[in-house]
Amino acid sequence: KNEVEQSPQNLTAQEGEFITINCSYSVGISALHWLQQHPGGGIVSLFMLSSGKKKHGRLIATINIQEKHSSLHITASHPRDSAVYICAVRDTGNQFYFGTGTSLTVIP
Amino acid sequence: NAGVTQTPKFRILKIGQSMTLQCTQDMNHNYMYWYRQDPGMGLKLIYYSVGAGITDKGEVPNGYNVSRSTTEDFPLRLELAAPSQTSVYFCASRETGELFFGEGSRLTVL
């Protein structure tokens, strides 16, 4: 069993739709990270959070420590949001565990 | 501020050849990591370092070696390349929080 599970694996949305990507984890964590990877590209950190909620532009990340669950929301999705979104957790021993990613395609 | 720089971006190796993937960061980060990314799999940790002179194995270290002689540099050495080492390799660094990744190195072993 993977320490980090993401859903869905693949997601197709129409431009303008509200998108939610979910992440569940099974280890005790110090922090949770949301990462973005464009096709053939590098990996960029979007958020790091250990409690509550963070917002950056049209992106919102939330975490529920008790339920060991995090969500990444994208409001008013745009084709440039098409990418793979990766959830990663850093455990209390400073080791990282990564989900397999959610591939998002936003259609104009 | 360049962040994390990896070279080369692409490389094709023949079975049995050796090579070094270079990774340099200019943020004075103590923690550095090497990951490999295979299709449909999450990033797998190869080696990591918590500071100059200190390295340790990750989940999939076989066939690789690292060194950390300076804070800035963390090269990954592939000895006797095998087809199973065909992958995309990412170097990353951090201090207390956010992870910073290089652009990745796509390696094919034929």
Image: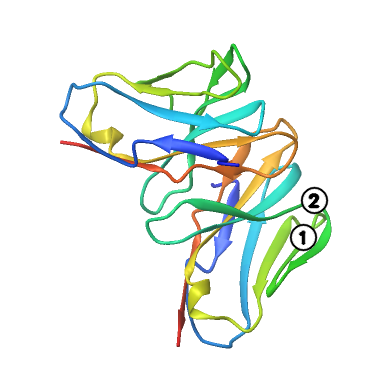
Instruction: Name the residue rendered at 45%, 88% in the picture.
Output: A108
Share a chain, discs 2 and 1?
yes
Q: Secondary structure at mark 1?
A: strand
Which sits in the foreground, B2 or A77? Answer: B2
Q: Amino acid at mark 2?
A: Ser
Circles 2 and 1 in contact, beta carbons < 8 Å: yes
Placement of B36 over or under B74, stated as above or below: below
Q: CA distance from mark 2 to mark 1?
A: 7 Å
Quarter of the picture holding the C terminus of chain B:
top left
Task: Please state if A101 lies on the left or on the right of B106 as rendered.
Answer: right
Q: Residue A57's x, y, as percent? A: 71, 72
Subunit that carries the residue with mark 2: A
Render colour scheme? rainbow
Residue type at mark 1? Ile
Q: Is residue B101 left or right of residue B60?
A: right
**Disc nearer the start of the sequence (2/1):** 2
Q: Which residue in the protein does label 1 denote?
A: A63
Q: Is residue B93 above or below residue B61?
A: below
Q: Where's residue B56, x and y in %? A: 55, 18
* Number of the label disc, if any, that sits on residue B57: none
Residue B62 visible in this rendered orientation of the protein: no
Q: Quadrant of residue A72?
A: bottom right
Q: Any mark on residue A50, and which?
A: 2
- Please tell me whether mark 2 sits on a helix, a strand or a loop: loop
> Is residue B90 positioned above or below B32 on the image?
below
Between residue B69 and residue A14, name the one nearer to us. B69
Residue B41, percent from left and from top: 43, 49
Quadrant of the frame with the N terminus of chain B: top right
